[in-house]
Image (spheres, helix red, strand yellow):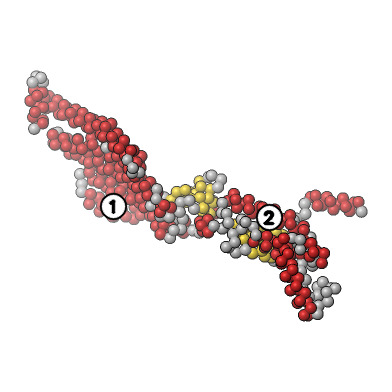
Amino acid sequence: MLVSYLNELLSQFNFDPAYLNMITYFVLAFIVFLLSFTANFITKKIILKAASWYIKNNRFTWDNIMLERKVFSRLSHCVPAVIIYIFINFFPDYLQEPLNRGVKVYIIFIALITLYALLDAVNDIYNSYSISKTRPIKSFLQVAKIFATVIAIVLMIAGIMGKSPSLLLGGIGALSAVLMLVFKDSILGLVGGVQLSANDMVRVGDWIEMPGYGADGDVIDISLNTVKVQNFDKTITTIPTYALVSNSFKNWRGMQESGGRRIMRSVHIDVSSIKFCTDGMLDSYLKIFHLRDYIDCRQKEIEEYNKSFGADPSVPINGRRMTNIGVFRHYIANYLKNHPKIHDGMIQIVRQLPPSEKGLPLQLYVFTNDTNWVNYEEIQADIFDHILAAASWFDLKIFQNPTGNDFRFALNKNGTN
Protein backbone atom coordinates (compact mmCIF):
# COMPACT_ATOMS: atom_id res chain seq x y z
CA MET A 1 0.00 0.00 0.00
CA LEU A 2 1.32 3.42 -0.96
CA VAL A 3 0.59 5.08 2.40
CA SER A 4 2.41 2.31 4.33
CA TYR A 5 5.38 2.54 2.00
CA LEU A 6 5.61 6.31 2.49
CA ASN A 7 5.20 5.87 6.24
CA GLU A 8 8.13 3.45 6.38
CA LEU A 9 10.22 5.67 4.15
CA LEU A 10 9.59 8.82 6.20
CA SER A 11 10.17 7.02 9.52
CA GLN A 12 13.86 6.79 8.57
CA PHE A 13 14.10 10.58 8.94
CA ASN A 14 13.27 10.41 12.66
CA PHE A 15 10.06 12.44 12.46
CA ASP A 16 7.95 12.71 15.60
CA PRO A 17 5.59 9.68 15.51
CA ALA A 18 2.70 11.96 16.50
CA TYR A 19 3.12 13.92 13.24
CA LEU A 20 4.34 11.11 11.03
CA ASN A 21 0.91 10.27 9.55
CA MET A 22 0.15 13.93 8.88
CA ILE A 23 3.52 14.39 7.16
CA THR A 24 2.89 11.23 5.15
CA TYR A 25 -0.43 12.58 3.83
CA PHE A 26 1.18 15.93 3.07
CA VAL A 27 3.84 14.15 1.03
CA LEU A 28 1.15 12.09 -0.66
CA ALA A 29 -0.79 15.24 -1.50
CA PHE A 30 2.39 16.78 -2.92
CA ILE A 31 3.02 13.67 -5.04
CA VAL A 32 -0.53 13.75 -6.37
CA PHE A 33 -0.19 17.48 -7.11
CA LEU A 34 3.15 16.88 -8.86
CA LEU A 35 1.69 14.02 -10.92
CA SER A 36 -1.35 16.12 -11.86
CA PHE A 37 0.82 19.08 -12.82
CA THR A 38 3.15 16.86 -14.86
CA ALA A 39 0.25 15.09 -16.59
CA ASN A 40 -1.37 18.46 -17.38
CA PHE A 41 1.93 19.81 -18.73
CA ILE A 42 2.52 16.73 -20.92
CA THR A 43 -1.04 16.82 -22.19
CA LYS A 44 -1.00 20.52 -23.12
CA LYS A 45 2.59 21.06 -24.19
CA ILE A 46 3.33 17.77 -25.92
CA ILE A 47 0.20 15.78 -26.77
CA LEU A 48 -1.98 18.76 -27.71
CA LYS A 49 0.81 20.40 -29.71
CA ALA A 50 1.46 17.19 -31.59
CA ALA A 51 -2.26 16.75 -32.21
CA SER A 52 -2.53 20.38 -33.35
CA TRP A 53 0.32 19.92 -35.84
CA TYR A 54 -1.32 16.79 -37.25
CA ILE A 55 -4.75 18.44 -37.47
CA LYS A 56 -3.39 21.51 -39.26
CA ASN A 57 -1.50 19.41 -41.79
CA ASN A 58 -4.10 16.81 -42.75
CA ARG A 59 -6.70 17.16 -45.52
CA PHE A 60 -9.73 17.41 -43.23
CA THR A 61 -11.29 20.70 -42.20
CA TRP A 62 -13.72 19.65 -39.48
CA ASP A 63 -10.90 18.87 -37.03
CA ASN A 64 -9.42 22.33 -37.62
CA ILE A 65 -12.72 23.86 -36.59
CA MET A 66 -12.78 21.72 -33.44
CA LEU A 67 -9.23 22.86 -32.69
CA GLU A 68 -10.21 26.52 -33.15
CA ARG A 69 -13.19 26.03 -30.84
CA LYS A 70 -10.79 24.58 -28.21
CA VAL A 71 -12.63 21.27 -27.87
CA PHE A 72 -9.42 19.33 -27.26
CA SER A 73 -7.95 22.02 -25.02
CA ARG A 74 -11.00 22.00 -22.71
CA LEU A 75 -11.11 18.21 -22.66
CA SER A 76 -7.48 18.13 -21.50
CA HIS A 77 -8.53 19.75 -18.19
CA CYS A 78 -9.97 16.38 -17.16
CA VAL A 79 -6.51 14.79 -16.94
CA PRO A 80 -5.54 16.27 -13.51
CA ALA A 81 -8.99 15.40 -12.16
CA VAL A 82 -8.58 11.77 -13.25
CA ILE A 83 -5.16 11.59 -11.52
CA ILE A 84 -6.69 12.95 -8.29
CA TYR A 85 -9.64 10.54 -8.57
CA ILE A 86 -7.24 7.57 -8.83
CA PHE A 87 -5.45 8.53 -5.59
CA ILE A 88 -8.53 9.44 -3.53
CA ASN A 89 -8.66 6.04 -1.79
CA PHE A 90 -5.16 6.60 -0.39
CA PHE A 91 -6.30 9.59 1.69
CA PRO A 92 -8.00 9.38 5.13
CA ASP A 93 -11.68 8.45 5.20
CA TYR A 94 -12.79 11.93 6.28
CA LEU A 95 -11.12 13.44 3.17
CA GLN A 96 -12.20 10.83 0.64
CA GLU A 97 -15.85 11.87 0.43
CA PRO A 98 -15.24 15.66 -0.03
CA LEU A 99 -12.49 14.97 -2.57
CA ASN A 100 -14.67 12.48 -4.42
CA ARG A 101 -17.54 14.97 -4.62
CA GLY A 102 -15.27 17.84 -5.64
CA VAL A 103 -13.63 15.83 -8.42
CA LYS A 104 -17.00 14.68 -9.77
CA VAL A 105 -18.34 18.24 -9.83
CA TYR A 106 -15.17 19.42 -11.57
CA ILE A 107 -15.35 16.65 -14.21
CA ILE A 108 -19.03 17.44 -14.87
CA PHE A 109 -18.17 21.13 -15.31
CA ILE A 110 -15.33 20.32 -17.72
CA ALA A 111 -17.62 17.97 -19.65
CA LEU A 112 -20.21 20.77 -19.89
CA ILE A 113 -17.85 23.42 -21.27
CA THR A 114 -16.35 20.82 -23.62
CA LEU A 115 -19.84 20.03 -24.88
CA TYR A 116 -20.42 23.76 -25.43
CA ALA A 117 -17.27 23.95 -27.57
CA LEU A 118 -18.22 20.76 -29.43
CA LEU A 119 -21.70 22.09 -30.28
CA ASP A 120 -20.20 25.38 -31.48
CA ALA A 121 -17.82 23.39 -33.67
CA VAL A 122 -20.72 21.33 -35.04
CA ASN A 123 -22.51 24.57 -35.93
CA ASP A 124 -19.41 25.94 -37.70
CA ILE A 125 -18.94 22.69 -39.63
CA TYR A 126 -22.61 22.64 -40.60
CA ASN A 127 -22.43 26.28 -41.74
CA SER A 128 -19.72 25.33 -44.23
CA TYR A 129 -22.37 23.44 -46.24
CA SER A 130 -24.88 25.19 -48.50
CA ILE A 131 -27.85 23.57 -46.74
CA SER A 132 -27.13 25.75 -43.69
CA LYS A 133 -28.48 28.76 -45.63
CA THR A 134 -31.94 27.22 -45.77
CA ARG A 135 -31.89 25.00 -42.65
CA PRO A 136 -29.87 26.66 -39.83
CA ILE A 137 -29.40 24.55 -36.69
CA LYS A 138 -28.03 27.17 -34.30
CA SER A 139 -31.30 27.47 -32.37
CA PHE A 140 -31.49 23.69 -31.91
CA LEU A 141 -27.91 23.57 -30.63
CA GLN A 142 -28.72 26.33 -28.17
CA VAL A 143 -31.65 24.27 -26.90
CA ALA A 144 -29.26 21.34 -26.49
CA LYS A 145 -26.96 23.62 -24.47
CA ILE A 146 -29.86 24.59 -22.20
CA PHE A 147 -30.81 20.96 -21.56
CA ALA A 148 -27.16 20.02 -21.00
CA THR A 149 -26.76 22.91 -18.55
CA VAL A 150 -29.85 21.90 -16.58
CA ILE A 151 -28.70 18.27 -16.39
CA ALA A 152 -25.16 19.32 -15.42
CA ILE A 153 -26.46 21.62 -12.66
CA VAL A 154 -28.65 18.82 -11.30
CA LEU A 155 -25.73 16.38 -11.33
CA MET A 156 -23.37 18.90 -9.68
CA ILE A 157 -25.86 19.76 -6.94
CA ALA A 158 -26.53 16.07 -6.40
CA GLY A 159 -22.77 15.43 -6.25
CA ILE A 160 -22.20 18.19 -3.70
CA MET A 161 -25.12 17.08 -1.54
CA GLY A 162 -24.35 13.38 -1.93
CA LYS A 163 -27.95 12.70 -3.01
CA SER A 164 -29.44 10.82 -5.94
CA PRO A 165 -30.10 13.00 -9.00
CA SER A 166 -33.58 11.45 -9.27
CA LEU A 167 -34.62 13.25 -6.07
CA LEU A 168 -33.64 16.60 -7.53
CA LEU A 169 -35.35 15.78 -10.81
CA GLY A 170 -38.53 15.07 -8.89
CA GLY A 171 -38.27 18.48 -7.27
CA ILE A 172 -37.75 20.08 -10.66
CA GLY A 173 -40.94 18.42 -11.86
CA ALA A 174 -42.80 20.12 -9.03
CA LEU A 175 -41.25 23.44 -10.06
CA SER A 176 -42.08 22.99 -13.74
CA ALA A 177 -44.45 25.98 -13.74
CA VAL A 178 -41.67 28.21 -12.41
CA LEU A 179 -39.24 26.80 -14.98
CA MET A 180 -41.76 27.44 -17.76
CA LEU A 181 -41.94 31.07 -16.65
CA VAL A 182 -38.15 31.42 -16.40
CA PHE A 183 -37.51 29.81 -19.79
CA LYS A 184 -40.56 31.31 -21.51
CA ASP A 185 -38.52 33.25 -24.06
CA SER A 186 -36.36 30.23 -24.83
CA ILE A 187 -39.39 27.98 -25.30
CA LEU A 188 -41.10 30.53 -27.55
CA GLY A 189 -37.81 30.97 -29.39
CA LEU A 190 -37.55 27.22 -29.91
CA VAL A 191 -41.09 27.05 -31.28
CA GLY A 192 -40.44 30.05 -33.51
CA GLY A 193 -37.12 28.64 -34.71
CA VAL A 194 -38.70 25.31 -35.64
CA GLN A 195 -41.47 27.07 -37.58
CA LEU A 196 -39.05 29.41 -39.34
CA SER A 197 -36.85 26.49 -40.35
CA ALA A 198 -39.65 24.08 -41.27
CA ASN A 199 -41.49 26.65 -43.41
CA ASP A 200 -38.29 28.23 -44.79
CA MET A 201 -39.60 31.66 -43.79
CA VAL A 202 -36.27 33.37 -43.32
CA ARG A 203 -32.60 32.53 -43.86
CA VAL A 204 -29.29 34.16 -43.02
CA GLY A 205 -28.60 36.60 -45.85
CA ASP A 206 -32.26 37.37 -46.57
CA TRP A 207 -33.34 41.00 -46.92
CA ILE A 208 -36.37 41.51 -44.68
CA GLU A 209 -38.51 44.47 -43.66
CA MET A 210 -40.28 44.61 -40.29
CA PRO A 211 -41.38 48.21 -39.65
CA GLY A 212 -42.75 47.39 -36.19
CA TYR A 213 -39.18 46.69 -35.03
CA GLY A 214 -37.45 49.23 -37.28
CA ALA A 215 -35.78 46.46 -39.26
CA ASP A 216 -34.92 46.89 -42.93
CA GLY A 217 -31.82 45.02 -44.02
CA ASP A 218 -30.04 41.67 -44.20
CA VAL A 219 -30.42 38.86 -41.67
CA ILE A 220 -26.97 38.15 -40.22
CA ASP A 221 -27.81 35.72 -37.42
CA ILE A 222 -30.67 33.45 -36.34
CA SER A 223 -30.41 32.13 -32.78
CA LEU A 224 -32.73 30.59 -30.22
CA ASN A 225 -34.10 33.86 -28.84
CA THR A 226 -33.21 36.51 -31.40
CA VAL A 227 -32.79 37.26 -35.07
CA LYS A 228 -30.23 39.96 -35.89
CA VAL A 229 -30.81 42.23 -38.87
CA GLN A 230 -28.14 44.57 -40.18
CA ASN A 231 -30.00 47.57 -41.56
CA PHE A 232 -28.76 49.43 -44.61
CA ASP A 233 -27.43 52.22 -42.39
CA LYS A 234 -25.25 49.50 -40.75
CA THR A 235 -27.16 49.55 -37.47
CA ILE A 236 -28.20 46.23 -35.94
CA THR A 237 -31.82 45.48 -35.05
CA THR A 238 -32.51 42.54 -32.75
CA ILE A 239 -35.91 40.89 -33.18
CA PRO A 240 -37.33 38.13 -30.94
CA THR A 241 -37.42 34.92 -32.97
CA TYR A 242 -41.03 34.24 -32.13
CA ALA A 243 -42.01 37.72 -33.36
CA LEU A 244 -41.24 36.62 -36.93
CA VAL A 245 -43.92 33.94 -36.54
CA SER A 246 -46.52 35.94 -34.62
CA ASN A 247 -46.13 39.18 -36.64
CA SER A 248 -45.94 39.93 -40.34
CA PHE A 249 -42.75 40.86 -42.15
CA LYS A 250 -41.64 41.22 -45.77
CA ASN A 251 -38.95 38.94 -47.17
CA TRP A 252 -37.35 40.11 -50.43
CA ARG A 253 -35.78 36.73 -51.18
CA GLY A 254 -38.43 35.95 -53.80
CA MET A 255 -37.49 39.09 -55.72
CA GLN A 256 -33.80 38.24 -55.61
CA GLU A 257 -34.37 34.65 -56.74
CA SER A 258 -36.75 35.66 -59.55
CA GLY A 259 -34.09 37.79 -61.24
CA GLY A 260 -36.42 40.77 -61.65
CA ARG A 261 -37.02 43.83 -59.47
CA ARG A 262 -40.17 45.90 -59.86
CA ILE A 263 -40.40 49.52 -60.94
CA MET A 264 -43.77 51.04 -60.05
CA ARG A 265 -43.58 54.79 -60.36
CA SER A 266 -45.76 57.45 -61.98
CA VAL A 267 -45.15 60.55 -64.06
CA HIS A 268 -47.85 63.20 -63.49
CA ILE A 269 -48.96 64.90 -66.71
CA ASP A 270 -50.48 68.38 -66.67
CA VAL A 271 -54.03 67.78 -67.94
CA SER A 272 -54.13 71.17 -69.72
CA SER A 273 -51.40 69.98 -72.12
CA ILE A 274 -53.37 66.94 -73.34
CA LYS A 275 -54.85 67.36 -76.86
CA PHE A 276 -55.71 65.68 -80.16
CA CYS A 277 -52.84 65.10 -82.55
CA THR A 278 -52.70 67.22 -85.70
CA ASP A 279 -51.34 65.97 -89.01
CA GLY A 280 -48.17 67.96 -88.39
CA MET A 281 -47.71 66.37 -84.98
CA LEU A 282 -48.21 62.88 -86.43
CA ASP A 283 -45.68 63.57 -89.18
CA SER A 284 -43.11 64.57 -86.56
CA TYR A 285 -43.91 61.48 -84.48
CA LEU A 286 -43.25 59.25 -87.51
CA LYS A 287 -39.60 60.25 -87.25
CA ILE A 288 -39.41 58.61 -83.80
CA PHE A 289 -38.05 55.08 -84.14
CA HIS A 290 -40.25 53.49 -81.47
CA LEU A 291 -43.46 54.96 -82.98
CA ARG A 292 -43.28 54.38 -86.76
CA ASP A 293 -45.06 51.05 -86.91
CA TYR A 294 -47.56 52.01 -84.22
CA ILE A 295 -48.65 55.29 -85.90
CA ASP A 296 -48.92 53.74 -89.36
CA CYS A 297 -51.06 50.89 -88.09
CA ARG A 298 -53.12 53.09 -85.78
CA GLN A 299 -53.82 55.76 -88.42
CA LYS A 300 -55.12 53.18 -90.90
CA GLU A 301 -57.33 51.63 -88.24
CA ILE A 302 -58.79 55.02 -87.22
CA GLU A 303 -59.35 56.18 -90.84
CA GLU A 304 -61.21 52.99 -91.70
CA TYR A 305 -63.32 53.29 -88.56
CA ASN A 306 -64.24 56.94 -89.21
CA LYS A 307 -65.10 56.23 -92.89
CA SER A 308 -67.38 53.38 -91.89
CA PHE A 309 -69.33 55.74 -89.62
CA GLY A 310 -69.11 58.77 -91.93
CA ALA A 311 -67.45 60.96 -89.30
CA ASP A 312 -66.72 64.56 -90.35
CA PRO A 313 -62.90 64.91 -90.12
CA SER A 314 -63.08 68.72 -89.94
CA VAL A 315 -64.26 68.47 -86.34
CA PRO A 316 -61.63 66.64 -84.25
CA ILE A 317 -64.07 65.26 -81.72
CA ASN A 318 -66.04 63.49 -84.42
CA GLY A 319 -65.10 59.82 -84.59
CA ARG A 320 -61.78 58.60 -83.24
CA ARG A 321 -58.56 60.59 -83.05
CA MET A 322 -55.08 59.98 -81.72
CA THR A 323 -54.02 62.07 -78.72
CA ASN A 324 -50.56 63.15 -77.65
CA ILE A 325 -50.96 61.40 -74.29
CA GLY A 326 -51.94 58.13 -76.01
CA VAL A 327 -48.99 58.32 -78.42
CA PHE A 328 -46.69 59.16 -75.52
CA ARG A 329 -47.97 56.16 -73.55
CA HIS A 330 -47.28 53.81 -76.45
CA TYR A 331 -43.89 55.41 -76.98
CA ILE A 332 -42.94 54.64 -73.37
CA ALA A 333 -44.23 51.06 -73.72
CA ASN A 334 -42.15 50.45 -76.87
CA TYR A 335 -39.15 52.18 -75.33
CA LEU A 336 -39.30 49.82 -72.34
CA LYS A 337 -39.72 46.73 -74.56
CA ASN A 338 -36.49 47.60 -76.30
CA HIS A 339 -34.62 48.60 -73.14
CA PRO A 340 -31.74 46.14 -72.45
CA LYS A 341 -32.20 46.38 -68.67
CA ILE A 342 -35.92 45.58 -68.57
CA HIS A 343 -36.88 41.94 -67.89
CA ASP A 344 -38.71 40.75 -71.00
CA GLY A 345 -40.11 37.67 -69.24
CA MET A 346 -42.13 39.65 -66.70
CA ILE A 347 -45.16 41.89 -66.96
CA GLN A 348 -44.75 45.30 -68.59
CA ILE A 349 -47.55 47.87 -68.27
CA VAL A 350 -47.73 51.61 -68.91
CA ARG A 351 -51.13 52.66 -67.62
CA GLN A 352 -53.17 55.70 -66.66
CA LEU A 353 -54.34 56.11 -63.09
CA PRO A 354 -57.36 58.23 -62.11
CA PRO A 355 -56.69 61.98 -62.52
CA SER A 356 -56.19 63.94 -59.35
CA GLU A 357 -55.29 67.43 -58.22
CA LYS A 358 -51.73 66.57 -59.27
CA GLY A 359 -52.67 65.86 -62.90
CA LEU A 360 -52.95 62.59 -64.81
CA PRO A 361 -50.64 59.87 -63.39
CA LEU A 362 -48.94 57.77 -66.07
CA GLN A 363 -47.62 54.75 -64.22
CA LEU A 364 -44.81 52.42 -65.26
CA TYR A 365 -45.15 48.86 -63.95
CA VAL A 366 -42.14 46.84 -65.17
CA PHE A 367 -39.26 44.76 -63.81
CA THR A 368 -35.55 45.29 -64.23
CA ASN A 369 -33.34 42.29 -64.99
CA ASP A 370 -30.80 43.37 -62.38
CA THR A 371 -31.81 43.04 -58.71
CA ASN A 372 -28.72 44.72 -57.29
CA TRP A 373 -29.90 47.79 -55.40
CA VAL A 374 -27.33 50.22 -56.81
CA ASN A 375 -27.82 49.01 -60.38
CA TYR A 376 -31.60 49.00 -59.97
CA GLU A 377 -31.67 52.64 -58.87
CA GLU A 378 -29.39 53.59 -61.76
CA ILE A 379 -31.65 51.84 -64.28
CA GLN A 380 -34.79 53.42 -62.81
CA ALA A 381 -33.27 56.90 -62.79
CA ASP A 382 -32.05 56.50 -66.38
CA ILE A 383 -35.54 55.49 -67.57
CA PHE A 384 -37.29 58.41 -65.87
CA ASP A 385 -34.63 60.87 -66.99
CA HIS A 386 -35.50 59.89 -70.55
CA ILE A 387 -39.28 59.98 -70.02
CA LEU A 388 -39.27 63.39 -68.35
CA ALA A 389 -37.12 64.83 -71.12
CA ALA A 390 -39.19 63.14 -73.88
CA ALA A 391 -42.54 64.53 -72.68
CA SER A 392 -41.95 67.93 -74.29
CA TRP A 393 -41.57 66.25 -77.72
CA PHE A 394 -45.24 65.29 -77.44
CA ASP A 395 -46.34 68.79 -76.37
CA LEU A 396 -46.96 67.46 -72.87
CA LYS A 397 -46.06 69.18 -69.62
CA ILE A 398 -45.03 67.43 -66.44
CA PHE A 399 -47.15 68.56 -63.51
CA GLN A 400 -45.56 70.08 -60.43
CA ASN A 401 -46.87 72.37 -57.76
CA PRO A 402 -46.04 76.04 -58.41
CA THR A 403 -42.85 77.29 -56.82
CA GLY A 404 -41.75 80.72 -55.71
CA ASN A 405 -40.18 81.33 -59.11
CA ASP A 406 -43.52 80.57 -60.80
CA PHE A 407 -45.32 83.17 -58.69
CA ARG A 408 -42.52 85.68 -59.22
CA PHE A 409 -42.68 85.16 -62.99
CA ALA A 410 -46.47 85.63 -62.97
CA LEU A 411 -46.21 88.85 -60.95
CA ASN A 412 -43.50 90.25 -63.22
CA LYS A 413 -45.54 89.37 -66.29
CA ASN A 414 -48.65 91.06 -64.92
CA GLY A 415 -46.60 94.07 -63.91
CA THR A 416 -45.18 94.36 -67.40
CA ASN A 417 -48.61 94.13 -68.98
Which quadrant would the N terminus be assigned to in this image?
A: top left
Q: Name the residue located 77 percent from the left edge and 51 percent from the top edge.
A: 403
Q: Is residue 209 left or right of residue 277?
A: left
Residue 41 location (% of width, % of height): 26, 31
Is any part of residue 74 visible from this angle? no
Q: Position of residue 28 (x, y in %)?
A: 15, 29
Label placed on residue 384: 2
Helix, strand or loop for disc 1 = helix
Task: Check residue 213 in the rendering and tell me which mark sits there, or answer none.
Answer: none
**What is the distance, in whole Å, between disc 1 and disc 2 at their CAs?**
67 Å
Spot occupied by residue 277 in the image (x, y as percentages of width and height): 79, 66
Placement of 312 over or under 416, stated as above or below:
below
Residue 187 in which image quadrant? bottom left
Where does label 1 land, which residue? 172
The residue at the point 14 percent across, 36 percent down is: 89
CB atoms at circles 1 and 2 under 8 Å apart? no
